[in-house]
Image (cartoon, helix red, strand yellow):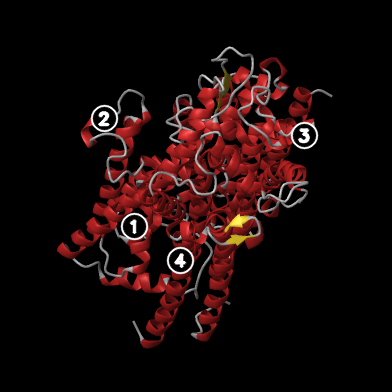
Amino acid sequence: MDLQTTIYIVVGLSFALYIGIAIWARAGSTSEFYVAGGGVPPVMNGMATAADWMSAASFISMAGLIANMGYGGGLFLMGWTGGYVLLACLLAPYLRKFGKFTVPQFIGDRFYSKTASTVAVICLLTASITYIIGQMTGVGVAFSRFLGVSSETGIYVGMGIVFMYAVFGGMKGITYTQVAQYIVLIFAYTIPAIFISLQLTGNPIPQLGLGSDMSGSNVSLLTTLDQVVTDLGFGKYTTTTAGSTLNMFVYTMSLMIGTAGLPHVIMRFFTVPKVADARTSAGWALVFIAILYTTAPAVAAMAKLNLHSTVNAAVMKGGDLYAPEASIKADERPDWMKRWEKTGLLKFEDKNGDGRIQYYNDATKNADAKAKAEQAGWKGNELTVNADIIVLANPEIALLPNWVIALVAAGGLAAALSTAAGLLMAISAAVSHDLIKGVFMPDISEKGELMAGKIAMAVAIVISGWLGLNPPGFAAGTVALAFGIAASSLFPAIMMGIFSKKMNKEGAVAGMLAGLFVTLFYVFAHKGIFFIKGTEFLDLIGGANSFFGITPEAFGAIGALVNFGVAFVVDKLTQEPPEHIQHLVESVRVPRGAKAVDGAHAH
Amino acid sequence: MDDTSAAYWRATLGLLVKVLVIWFVISFGAGILFAPALNSISLGGYPLGFWFAHQGSIYVFIALIFYYAKKMGDIDRQFDVHED
């Protein structure tokens, strides 16, 4: 069977499975629709949370970025897992005790103000829609290669499928679908990694393979990789940081607190039966996430080594990387390169006209590498590889069987679709429950509320699909922006709502608005107003990364500091919160008396 | 706030501080600030600082959450505020 047919069959089967589950688990009531009736056991909830959490950014994009960045890519690994520690011990159990559907509802009740909940809805929508844009980018990349369509058509197909099961299934359907999606995506990620680790090091466990010696030699894989990339003028793999150490620090922090502030993740902890379950559920979620996250650095390093050895024979055999016969002949390049060239995400250009492909860093500061390249008659780097294709192309680079390649395609789509569905649930709940029922139409019927939620999802899908056609960066970069927005706006407000009895509504609202505003200002300066190209205003802030060299993706942590600071000052200048709110905070801190989650507003 | 619930909250915060200090030292300490120094030590074929950033911190995070959940359960029972 040829590759294309195998891909159609595997992807088609996985989709049929998800849609089947969504129909089987249709939601009847609002409680089932939003929080699956509050009855999902912790291990299964952990698995669904993991699928919800691991998006196209984790699956498709992250390992490719790590391969490019080396050690500095660790900021994604630490940032997107460390946040669970914060979630488990600072937020999840208390929000579960509070016992409502949504994050804006908590903020509205705790800060006794509809203004506060409306501001929280705005923050939530900004973060969630930015996040879905990143997913749509990933879906576009995956479909364009595997279904042989343009990335635009890919995005339209993805929009249709997400809409179908998010709308019909609700949270109960999504939870069970996500369990299935987790299983598909984790096999799709680890199986090729096991094959490749075995090929390169003889050790089947990628986490150990990365720290092992190369097969048939006593030099470790990382040492070999360091040697090859530095010889070719790239930064040393195991020590290159992401910008300055300060930037890496702030970036990691931003991803961690963003994790803890993202509404679609927090919402998952409302679906467990008890407060104690909310704590362990976060642990289980991280176990399931860690299977992929500890494999990713191995995938990254091994894919990088394989890519270099594909184009340069001296990488594996040893000898001179700059010898003329070491570089591969262009017309002998493998089929997978030709396949990816069609998508435009991999490009080859014979600059020195020798009919061979030279892949190296032509902008290197390493004088030795520069001299060698000149001596060998190399006229510039001839191969560009888009970071977002590394994971998808990885099994092809390692020449693995067709069914593995097809499985990876299904996994990438599962990751993107499950996250998009979870985010749409959060958007739908915020708009229908917090905005329409909570503020504008308190008497709306349960049926009307469900309908409003579904319309909100449809609108969100259209907006994010449209913005996804013209994304602000790589999938993982766009998603990191969404984390920055959540980190700077929602996380501080929730934290202060639980840990400070005296924080009042004026402080919380001013803090959220200030945090959101400075972060968006810095991000839009780099990426354009609402990510529309051509509206960047870098001159106004004094050039790119002008704030101590911090990149826009990393700025969320600074926004959070502004949020805390403004909230503190405004709180000191205005009235204390009323007595009953201080009692509410005390009761949230104690597990006993937790009830099933319901949607009633306190006012 | 009465005495028991004040004591319960103090115990909770005490545990939180302990967990968050470890969280910070492992990721931001060993994984970022001290990574260059730790890289001179090797763990299998891994430089140690690189290992903390790409592997070790994740394992520690998992252990931390389960440790926290267990200790928190103990504190709940000690102050008789657990569920059921």
For residue A493, the mark is: 1
- Neighbor class of circle 2 (other Cα within 10 Å; few <14, some 14-19, many 20+) is some
Question: Which mark is nearer the camera, 2 or 3?
Answer: 3
For residue A537, the mark is: 2
Q: Amino acid at mark 2?
A: Phe
The residue lying toward the viewer, choosing from B55 and A563, is B55
Chain letter of disc 3 in the image: A
* Lateral position of residue A119 relative to residue A24, left or right: left
Among the two numbered marks 3 and 1 on one chain, the one whose residue lies closer to the N terminus:
3
Among the two numbered marks 2 and 3 on one chain, the one whose residue lies closer to the N terminus:
3
Question: Rounded to the nearest whole Å, what is the CA distance between mark 2 and mark 3?
Answer: 46 Å
Q: Which residue position is annotated with label 4?
A: B25
* CB-based contact (under 8 Å), mark 3 and mark 4: no
Q: Amino acid at mark 1?
A: Ala
- Neighbor class of circle 1 (other Cα within 10 Å; few <14, some 14-19, many 20+) is many
Does the rendering let one see residue A99?
no
- For label 2, the SS is loop
Question: Rounded to the nearest whole Å, what is the CA distance between mark 2 and mark 1?
Answer: 29 Å
Q: Are discs 3 and 1 both within one chain? A: yes
For residue A400, the mark is: 3
Q: Position of residue A260 (x, y in %)?
A: 45, 56
- Quadrant containing the C terminus of chain A is bottom left
Q: Position of residue A141 (x, y in %)?
A: 58, 28
Identity of the residue furthest to the right in this view = A1
* CB-based contact (under 8 Å), mark 2 and mark 4: no
Chain letter of disc 1 in the image: A
